[in-house]
Amino acid sequence: MKKKLMKSTARVLGTVAAVIFAAWFVVAQPSCRGNHASGVATDPAKLREHVETLSQRLCPRDWQHRDNLDKCADYIAEHFVQAGATVEFQTLTAGGKRYRNVIGRFNAGKRSRLVVGAHYDACGEVPGADDNASGIAALIELAYLLGRNAPTNAVDLVAYVLEEPPFFRTECMGSAVHAKSIAGEKASVRGVIVLEMVGCFKDEWGSQAYPTLLLRLMYPSRANFIAVASRWDQGDWIKRVKAGMKGTTDLPVYSIRAPSAIPGIDFSDHLNYWPYGFKALMITDTAFYRNKAYHSSGDTPERLDYSRLGKVVVAVFETIRGI
């Protein structure tokens, strides 16, 4: 009787393990593919300077402080120009006020383009250092890398306005306006990469949280990695971007393809490109699953890791070169 019970238990455990492994293989899309270490680098001090400018000097930068948002747009545009991009503003109206997306183009004459974006507004009167000054800092330094190492493809860097509430999931989001515009142009877009909170990293065990027990079993417990995330049907694009990032620096890169029902999968600007059939994902430090100062006054510059933020920039740059 005892032997039968042990065999039965072993079969059940084996089945559970097989199910978890199968789920991990489909959701995490593991790959042994790697790349040579990149020969380029970014300056952590410059990344910090951008983050401090947006989260301190230009704070608050929510929708009700349009003057500061305009200064943010001008700051981003100035750096895009210095990096060698062709810059234009995309104007939109929300709540009776005018706001601007900032677009920096490289190789604008090429037919097919890659879009890399990040939002520059914050949620209320908070610093928003990680959310999302970190994404904008990465976008600006990515522009400088593209300016010094010209891509073979067209690349549009887009700084979005109005990602945060009360406009989130509305047609007033800057990314919604941009997505609609390129769909109207019938532009040939290779894919969209959104940088959403990319500066928070921790090495302590248990510093990384997840929305489900299954994901906790499938991914690391230490918040020392960057994630490539999107909806279930974006699997090929997720795999391609992750493959382009892995090994270019020593920063671990993980990915997740999951239904939008998983909280966080569609919590950024990439969601606005899906209705038009564009491939779109976000690169993220996993936001509130890691950064406990999310949408609070504690989201300040000194809490970020600018060395690892720089590695995110390099990994994205090398991905752009390889696509």
Image (cartoon, helix red, strand yellow):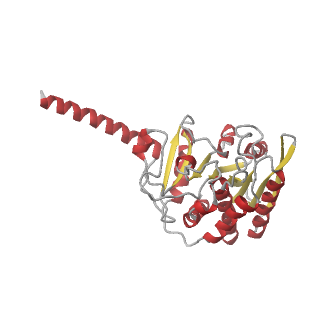
Q: Residue at x 44, y 54 (%)?
A: 222
Q: Quadrant of the N terminus?
A: top left
Quarter containing the C terminus: bottom right
Q: Is residue 179 visible?
A: yes
Quarter of the image where one finds residue 269:
top right
Q: Position of residue 216 (x, y in %)?
A: 42, 44
Asked if 131 appears above or below 24 in the picture, the reply is: below
**Where residue 178 sits in the image (x, y, percent)?**
76, 47
The x and y percentages for residue 75 are: 78, 63
User: Quick one: which residue is furthest to the front in this view?
Assistant: 297
Horizontal relation, residue 253 to residue 174: left or right: left
Task: Give the total number of marks visible in the rendering.
Answer: 0
Quadrant of the rendered structure where residue 181 is? top right
Please report the residue visible at 81 percent of the width from the left and 59 percent of the height from the top.
Answer: 71
Horizontal side of residue 91 vs 174, given as left or right: right
Residue 230 locus on image (x, y percent): 57, 44
* Residue at screen point 55% across, 34% down: 261
Name the one closer to the observer, 192 or 296.
296
Q: Residue at x 75, y 64 (%)?
A: 80
Q: Which residue is outermost to the top?
A: 1
